[in-house]
Amino acid sequence: MSGRTLFDKVWAAHEVVAETPDTPAVLYIDLHLTHEVTSPQAFSLLKRLGLPVRRLDRTLATLDHSTPTLSEQVFGNVPIKLDAAAHQVRELEQNAAEFGVELFGMRDARRGIVHVISPELGATQPGMTIVCGDSHTSTHGAFGALAFGIGSTEVGHVFATQALLQRKPKTFAVNVEGRLGAGVTAKDLILAVIGRIGVSGGTGHVLEYRGAAIRALSMDERMTVCNMSIEAGARAGMIAPDEVTFAYLRGRPRAPQGRDWDAAVARWRTLASDPDARFDASVDIDASLLEPMITYGTNPGMVLPIGGSIPERAGDAVFDKALRYMGFHGGDTMLGKPVDVVFIGSCTNGRLEDLQAAARILKGRKVAPGVRLLIVPGSQQVKRDAEAAGYADIFKAAGADWRESGCSMCLGMNGDTVGAGQYSVSTSNRNFEGRQGKGARTLLASPFTAAASAVQGRIADPRGML
Ligand code: SF4
């Protein structure tokens, strides 16, 4: 019998009832993260059935998707502009109070994007099962957790039972050796992986990112990689916990402390895939060959090295439709295309290291005339850290708009949107039609590329600006 993968070990430790050909497995959930958009229906279900939230100690709520990012709306008395957003915020506040769920409310210093704050607090830990009503829950896999998004109905199930019905996914090794070059980031790496295996390449699988290039990444970078696993169609993405993981978690408020810490680290060390573990699928990538990447279409798999040209695919109606929406043509080069908006933020690239990267490019430079640069920290903690490090001053001096934390222009639910027909270089994770606003044209890239493009007013290669 071959050894077990990281995924196999976490799954086995949480399987309450094994799956059969007719029934899915029952999986115990260690941590349930929730926010204002996918929770109302779930709370309504509990009310209808007269049920409490079963494990309040394993449930954590924050406000992020619909929250305003203007300081006067968060901390002043200026009301939230969008009725729908204001309603969602109020509803979660009421539901959390009624059910006793811990909520990081609008003015809480710990508030932020759900996938940023949980790691920041040390609530996300290796070997856990973590769910949230949001696709990018895969982010937490960076810690060696099995973490995935669930639908609103499942949010209700987890509230009521702390368990979930699940079919067991297959395993997929993404082996990345070599070293990333200067100006090439974790975002470029994951975009290259998605470009290589395609947006459904990971369907039915949990990806495990492995190899020297992955081990060399910081936790912020690992979170960027795992965050976008879902964009390759995968159920989740995972990275084996190691010294980098332990150093990140040590001393965080919700991480184990004292003797519990030593016991936890000893346990976490056993989680790595066994040397003889077999994966159902694999791909090999040489990090040293990667370049800054940029998308040109309407899914993250439509991606190119920044100096490349859009492929020509005569007779491919879906491809043609995507290019028509983007206003591009086969054979076009991406470098030098004009840009209207640049967004730096989101659960993919709204952490301190992402803002540090943006600050490296923006220091002593100005945003090009006519370009709007919006920089939104992933959490209030990231905001405070970026201000203490002087990054916020660099952003403001460059002409950027520096905001309070939230999902913001990743999906525009709070009113931070891109205009119809405008081009937006965005560090977020989805470039679907209308994701950043009706008719908006999104180009996904790293914080380096986004900041460089804001300065040039055109899609720019950041490597000449570092
Ligand atoms: S930043 Fe975007 S992808 Fe991340 S949780 Fe918010 S809406 Fe979802």
Image: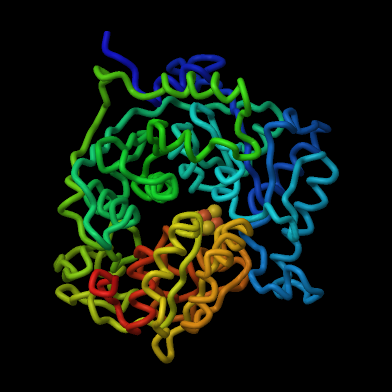
Count of numbered circles on the image: 0
Task: Return the residue nearer the eye: 56 or 223.
Answer: 223
Task: Return the residue nearer the eye: 285 or 179.
Answer: 179
Examine the rendered structure and indicate whether residue 2 appears above or below residue 65: above
* Colour style of the rendered protein structure: rainbow
Give the left or right position of residue 292, taking residue 87 as reference.
left
Give the left or right position of residue 243, taking residue 302 as reference.
right
Q: Quadrant of residue 168?
A: top left
Task: Check the picture and name the quadrant holding the N terminus.
Answer: top left
Task: Check the picture and name the quadrant holding the C terminus.
Answer: bottom left
Residue at x 61%, y 73% (from the top left corner): 415
Examine the rendered structure and indicate whether residue 348 appears above or below residue 326: above
- Residue 44: x percent and y percent? 76, 44
Q: Is residue 421 visible?
A: no
- Residue 388: x percent and y percent? 58, 64
- Residue 177: x percent and y percent? 20, 41
Residue at x 74%, y 28% (from the top left corner): 54
Give the left or right position of residue 325, taking residue 61 as reference.
left
Q: Is residue 113 visible?
A: yes
- Residue 262: x percent and y percent? 54, 22
Examine the rendered structure and indicate whether residue 280 appears above or below residue 359: above
In the orientation shown, which residue stands out farthest toward the bottom?
369
Task: Return the residue nearer the eye: 293 or 310.
Answer: 293
Residue at x 55%, y 58% (from the top left corner): 378
Residue at x 61%, y 59% (from the top left corner): 65
In the orientation shown, which residue stands out farthest toward the top?
1
